[in-house]
Image (cartoon, rainbow, N blue to C red):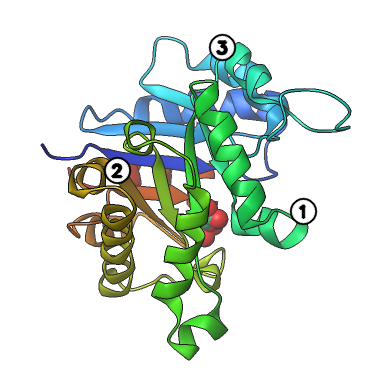
């Protein structure tokens, strides 16, 4: 069975709650495409108005981060239960910016993935290499290791529903997109890694996104690759251009 494409916007730390509603109103008519799952990963404080503003549309709301503990003394954090209660369906786990600035590690990524599934949230698990790692030729080993740890103790029936986002760090926010061949090579290797951890059926089911300077101009070429099942889009998800990305196949 063909995998349905999933295209998610990662708004990062942009848009106040009222700006979020305005942006959603602008994008709503532009992001209709029955062949694609459309997700907006918004800042925590925008989640509730965003869920309200997207009711009755094809847009699903995601979060950008989540704590791996159930609840308690973790000032400033958001729990899985809070996200579910607010109407969130997806949560980005282990984005490279969180790994770099907020002490997220492969081990805490794993804990968060387990906690997300426990509460019925779908994790968008991020991996990706730095420019130095790419130049050293260790990209595939590196991202597979990140994914192996992220999925420790996750049963196959849950892993099947997960989303992996391959995001080369050197391509994020730089306008320097990976070529379709580079992105396909790594996404294919990640699928192979999933088949080693689980089995072929799980590898065939799991959806793997590419992220890093995805734009209306390069989306169609990237998403035509056999192992790229959509994108995680930063900068271009805040503009009407996101409609062209979602409708890459039209
Ligand atoms: P970008 O960000 O599209 O702005 O490069 C992608 C991401 O960090 O998810």
Q: Earlier in the sequence, mark 1 or mark 2?
A: 1
Q: Which mark is first along the chain, 1 or 3? A: 3
Question: Mark 2 or mark 3, which is nearer the start of the sequence?
Answer: 3
Displayed quadrant of residue 180: bottom left
- What is the spatial separation of the Cα atoms under label 3 and label 1, in whole angstroms? 29 Å
Q: Position of residue 76 (x, y in %)?
A: 85, 33
Where 43 sits versus 101, above or below?
above
Place residue 161 in its image quadrant.
top left
Q: Nearer the viewer, mark 3 or mark 1?
A: 1
Q: What residue did someone put label 1 on?
A: 102
For the residues labelled 1 and 2, the Cα–Cα distance comes to 27 Å
Query: Which residue does the image show at 71% across and 62% down from the upper left?
Result: 100
Compared with 203, 77 (above or below) is above
Q: Residues within 10 Å of mark 1 (few under 14, many from 20)?
A: few
Position of residue 114 measured from the top left corner of the image (x, y, whole percent): 55, 35
Q: Residue at x 46, y 11 (%)?
A: 55
Q: Which residue is mark 2?
A: 206
Residue 62 seen in the current view: no
- Looking at the rendered structure, the secondary structure element under dot 2 is loop
**In this orientation, does residue 216 appear?**
yes
Residue at 61%, 59% (x, y): give it.
96
Q: Residue furthest front?
A: 153
Q: Is mark 2 within 8 Å of ligand 1?
A: no
> Cα distance, mark 3 to mark 2?
29 Å
Front residue of 146 and 221: 146
The residue carrying mark 3 is 52
Indicate the quadrant containing the N terminus: top left, top right, bottom left or bottom right. Answer: top left
Quadrant for the C terminus in the image: top left
Residue 229 position within the rendered picture, expressed as x and y whole percent measured from the top left: 27, 48
Between circles 1 and 2, the one closer to the viewer is 2
């Amino acid at each position: 069975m063909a995998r349905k494409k999933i295209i998610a916007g990662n708004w990062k730390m942009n848009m106040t709650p009222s700006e979020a509603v305005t942006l959603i109103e602008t994008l709503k008519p532009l992001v209709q495409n029955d062949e694609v799952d459309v997700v907006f990963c918004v800042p925590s404080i925008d989640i509730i108005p965003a869920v309200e503003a997207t009711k009755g549309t094809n847009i699903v709301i995601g979060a950008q981060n989540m704590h791996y503990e159930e609840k308690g003394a973790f000032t400033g954090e958001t729990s899985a239960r809070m996200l579910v209660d607010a109407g969130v369906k997806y949560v980005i786990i282990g984005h490279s910016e969180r790994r770099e600035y907020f002490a997220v590690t492969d081990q805490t990524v794993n804990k968060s993935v387990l906690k997300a599934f426990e509460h019925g949230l779908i994790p968008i698990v991020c991996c990706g290499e730095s420019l130095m790692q790419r130049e050293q030729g260790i990209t595939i080993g590196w991202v597979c290791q990140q994914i192996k740890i992220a999925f420790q103790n996750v049963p196959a029936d849950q892993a099947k529903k997960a989303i992996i986002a391959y995001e080369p760090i050197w391509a994020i926010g730089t306008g320097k997109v990976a070529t379709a061949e580079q992105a396909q090579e790594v996404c294919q290797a990640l699928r192979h890694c999933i088949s080693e951890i689980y089995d072929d059926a799980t590898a065939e089911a799991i959806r793997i996104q590419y992220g890093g300077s995805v734009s209306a101009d390069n989306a169609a070429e990237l998403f035509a690759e056999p192992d790229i099942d959509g994108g995680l889009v930063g900068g271009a998800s805040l503009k009407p251009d996101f409609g062209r990305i979602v409708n890459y196949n039209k």
